[in-house]
Every structure is written in C-alpha cells, then in structure tokens.
Image (cartoon, rainbow, N blue to C red):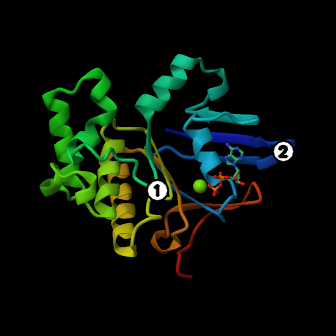
Amino acid sequence: MRIQIQNLHKKYQRGDTELEVLRGISCEFRAGSFNFILGPSGSGKSTLLYLLGVLDQPTSGKILIDGSAIDSWDEAKRNAYRKNDVGFIFQNFNLMSNLSALDNVLVPFLPQGVDQKLTQTAMQLLERVGLKDRVDHKPNHLSGGEQQRVAIARALLKKPQLILADEPTGELDSVSGRMIFDLLRELGQEQNATIIIVTHDERHIHPKDIVHRIQDGLFIDSIEEKGSSQ
Ligand SMILES: Nc1ncnc2c1ncn2[C@@H]1O[C@H](COP(=O)(O)OP(=O)(O)O)[C@@H](O)[C@H]1O
Ligand SMILES: [Mg+2]
C-alpha cells in the first residue's frame, strides 16, 4: 500500500486554546517500505498514526491511499479500510486478559465467526512468532515480549497491507525489543506490507530503513539513514 500525505495539519481544541500538533506534514510511504517515525514525547507521533489509520480526521491536508483521497471515502469504505487493510500494534499490547494467546489472535474475527482454516493460520502465525508452546496461555502467564508477539500475530492474521505500530517495544527490554523489530521486518516483507513504526528505540534501526523525524509538528528530515551507530 502506498501512502501519500500532503500538507497535513491537526489541531486540538483544549478549552479555549488551540493546540496545533501537526503543522503541515508531507511525505510518501512507499508500498512495502519499512518506516520509522522518531520524535520527542508530545510531538504528534500518535496523532499521525491515528490519522493514517483513519481513527481521526485531519484539520486540513490530504492522505491518499494508493492514490485515493481518504476524505472522499464514505463511512463504509473507512470501516472496511480499518477492518481489512490496517493492522494496529500498541505499546501496551491491548490483549484480552481472559482469553488464551490463540483466542487473542482470533479476536478480530470472532464477530463474523472463526473456521478451522483461520484457526490453523492463527496457529501458524503463533508458531512463526515463536509461541508454539504458548497458544493456550493467558496474557498474565506470558512475558511482555511474548504478549507483544501475540499482538503482532493478531495484527497480521488479516494480512494487512499497512501495519501501524505505536511504540511497540516501549514496555520491553532490549532483547525482546530487537526480536519484535526483526519479526515485523520479516513478516512485513513476506506479506509485502507497508510498515510504519513510532519508536524511541533507535538502536534497532537498520541502514536501509527509512527514518522520519518529527519535531514541533513538522518532519525535520526524511532521510534514509546511513546507519544508526554513525
Ligand atoms: N484528543 C486530544 N485532545 C487534545 N489534545 C490532544 C489529544 N490527543 C493528543 N493531544 C495532544 O497533542 C500533542 C501530541 O500528542 P501525541 O500525538 O500523542 O504525541 P506523541 O505520540 O508524539 O507523544 C500532545 O500535546 C497531546 O497532549
Ligand atoms: Mg504517542
């Protein structure tokens, strides 16, 4: 999925003051690309992800998905996009505490019913993320890294064309963090998904990754990093 954003602005109203969080961001996320968004706390990173996931609307500016402007979509198309095309991964995993790892992966499909084939695919994904022996475990019997891997399997089950991850390793130690990024890289490539990750964790950025830095509501650079350690 190719995403273009054009002069994107987002303002929030807080009492009688207006807070302009995004002040004219433009860029393109190529189909199948692996992107990081870096920036200080409060700089509008989550806001941008919500706009890309159509969980909120920009104040002005455009987002085009494979050339089609989101603001021209009706509610049905917006819902279909959120449901079928976008996989969300959050910092705090957002798992259901009373469900097994397997059922957590299947959760998005429960309303429409889950058949054997889908259950099998979910099992394969859990195996893929290294949780073959944990499928029956509930979240409180899993480590943070394992819980995030369940959340990744859940996001990938629908084969999303876009994966939006909001500080997915924020709660994890560095070894688990590396594993999460490596998995997102591998699985994203396999499914040719466009991946956009908001993070503070610059240690796991690869030379070929695309890095956007956001500051004061603007992308201050959009460069292909030559290496995180240089
Ligand atoms: N729904 C909202 N209403 C008012 N202000 C908000 C809302 N959401 C976020 N903000 C404010 O917008 C700014 C950017 O927030 P956010 O996008 O969450 O930043 P980041 O994810 O980079 O930490 C912050 O100052 C935050 O308090
Ligand atoms: Mg945030």
* Residue name at image x 22 percent, y 59 percent: 141
* Residue name at image x 49 percent, y 69 percent: 205
For this orientation, the residue located farthest to the bottom is 230
SS state under label 1: loop
Binning the other alpha carbons within 10 Å of mark 2 as few (below 14), some (14 to 19) or many (20 upward) gives few
Q: For the residues labelled 2 and 1, say whether their Cβ atoms are less than 8 Å apart.
A: no
On screen, residue 39 versus residue 116, left or right, reads: right
Query: Is residue 28 in sight in this rendering?
Result: no
SS state under label 2: strand
Which is more N-terminal, label 1 or label 2?
2
Q: Position of residue 28 (x, y in %)?
A: 62, 46
On screen, residue 196 versus residue 44, left or right, reads: left
| 67 versus 23 height, above or below | above
Task: Tell me the number on the disc at residue 151.
Answer: none
Q: Which residue is mark 2?
A: 18
On screen, residue 176 versus residue 203, left or right, reads: left
* Residue name at image x 44 percent, y 33 percent: 85
Q: Which residue is mark 1?
A: 91
Q: Position of residue 56 (x, y in %)?
A: 63, 35
Q: Position of residue 41 (x, y in %)?
A: 65, 63
| 68 versus 129 height, above or below | above
Amino acid of disc 1: Gln
Quadrant (top left, top right, bottom left, bottom right) of the C terminus: bottom right
Mark 1, ligand 2, within 8 Å: the answer is yes
Q: Position of residue 117 (x, y in %)?
A: 15, 31
* Residue name at image x 63 percent, y 40 percent: 4
Q: Quadrant of residue 179?
A: bottom left
